[in-house]
Image (cartoon, rainbow, N blue to C red):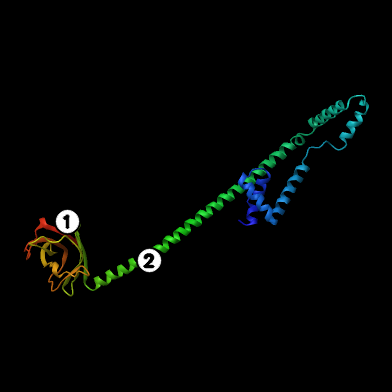
Amino acid sequence: MNTKNYIASGMIEGYLFGLANADERLEFEQMLKVDAELRAEYEKVQDSLLNYMKSNQRKLPEGMKEKLWEKLSGTAQMGEGHRLNLVESAEQMVMKRAPIIVRLMPFAVAASLALFSMSAYMAWDYHKKWLRSENKIAGLEKEKNQVADQLKPLQSKLDDANNDLDHLNHQGIKLVRMHGKGISPESSALVCWDTKAKTVCLYDMKMPAAPSGKQYQLWAIVDGKPVNVSMIDFAKVDKKHNSYSMNNIKIENASAFAVTLENEGGAEVPTMEALYMMGGI
């Protein structure tokens, strides 16, 4: 906080009227030692308060005290203490007869100072809370910007992926993710069906090794009926890319693909009890 804001916060008044806590008083006193502008303003406020208090002190009417001493000049034989008591009694009598505004002046001054002190403290306390809120808002804004920066690369990758899908669809390529079924829930594979080139390729294949005498068979669901696509020969699987290609595939309007475990050589109708995975377009 700069000096002008610090002065405007009401800290000087809070310090003078004892409203600041120990840490705030220590901070203020340290700043007084090094900040000439703050020190000058502190002395100015202090002098103003002292002058205000002096100008509102209760006084007897002019000449009243001299008249009282003249009245008491014949009481020399009395003790000094007795004369002082008479003077004090006379002063009290004068104040009782004075207008009520005169008698209430000290209380008015005290109330004014209390109100001034409370206003200064509230302004100072509000200013501190406002600064804390500003810092929190700045922190949240910074976090929001950081999250936005982190999301930019992800959004860019997502846009690229969507563009690739649009391109594939435009080229007549269909991608279908097959998921494992009850007999093998961990199984999965990605079907890449090129409708123009009449090819089907399986990628990212995850399925257990076929038992002896058994072989996986890929089916296409066309008009609600299973159509044989090809047997999967694991001896011909591309180990580097974990893929298997099938050419000259004569299927159209397929709505889904599925894989079953059949006897070697395949079956004309899929064995539904041996359904390993399936996925719709």
Label 2 crowding class (10 Å Cα cut-off): few <14, some 14-19, many 20+?
few
Q: Is residue 231 above or below residue 109?
A: below
* Residue 2 image point, x, y percent: 62, 57
Image check: 125 left or right of 198? right
* Residue 94 image point, x, y percent: 82, 31
| Image quadrant in which you'd find residue 50 | top right
- Report the number of discs: 2
Instruction: Name the residue carrying label 1.
Output: 184
> Does the residue at mark 2 contact the one at mark 1 (Cβ under 8 Å)?
no
Which amino acid lies under the numbered mark 1 shown in the image of this protein? Ser
Please say whether residue 258 is visible from this viewpoint. Answer: yes
Q: Secondary structure at mark 1?
A: loop
Q: Is residue 97 above or below residue 150?
A: above
User: Where the C terminus falls, by quadrant?
Assistant: bottom left
Mark toward the viewer: 2 or 1: 1
Residue at the image position 25 percent from the left and 71 percent from the top = 168
| Image quadrant in which you'd find residue 181 | bottom left
Which amino acid lies under the numbered mark 2 shown in the image of this protein? Pro
- Please tell me which of labels 2 and 1 falls first in the chain: 2
Along the viewing direction, whichever of 200 and 239 lies nearer the viewer: 239
Q: In 3D space, how far apart are the residues under numbered discs 2 and 1 (Cα atoms)?
A: 36 Å
* Residue 220 image point, x, y percent: 14, 65
Instruction: Name the residue carrying label 2.
Output: 153
| Image quadrant in which you'd find residue 20 | top right
Residue at the image position 68 percent from the left and 45 percent from the top = 16
